[in-house]
Amino acid sequence: MTDEDAAVRARAVGALRQMGEPAVHVLIDALLEALADEDGSVRAEAARVLGTLGEPAKAAVPALIEAG
């Protein structure tokens, strides 16, 4: 999540979703970090992926509201 290119960061966020259920907590931590990214496309992709996680992402709601 530290690449200078926002498109690379956004793709990385999408790729994190491929990690699946076993790594969901690591995934959520990375997505919370991405919600604070300077680029809107990275923040949007993080929010989109969080929305696909269901109940495990419930703790991310305050960060989603803040990022909005």
Image (cartoon, rainbow, N blue to C red):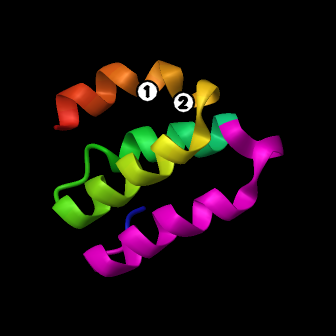
Residue drawn at x 69%, y 64% is 18
Residue drawn at x 20%, y 37% is 67
Residue that mark 2 sits on: 57
Which secondary structure class fits the magenta region best?
helix
**Residue toward you, 23 or 64:** 64
**Is 65 positioned to the left or the right of 1 in the image?**
left
Q: How many marks can you see?
A: 2
Q: Amino acid at mark 1?
A: Ala
Q: Characterize the local packing of mark 2: few (<14), some (14-19) or many (20 or more) Cα atoms within 10 angstroms.
A: some
Q: Is residue 8 magenta?
A: yes
Residue that mark 1 sits on: 60
> Eyeballing the image, is 4 above or below 53?
below
Residue drawn at x 49%, y 19% is 59
Classify mark 1: helix, strand or loop.
Answer: helix
Measured Cα–Cα span from mark 1 to mark 2: 5 Å
Q: Are marks 1 and 2 in contact (CB under 8 Å)?
A: yes
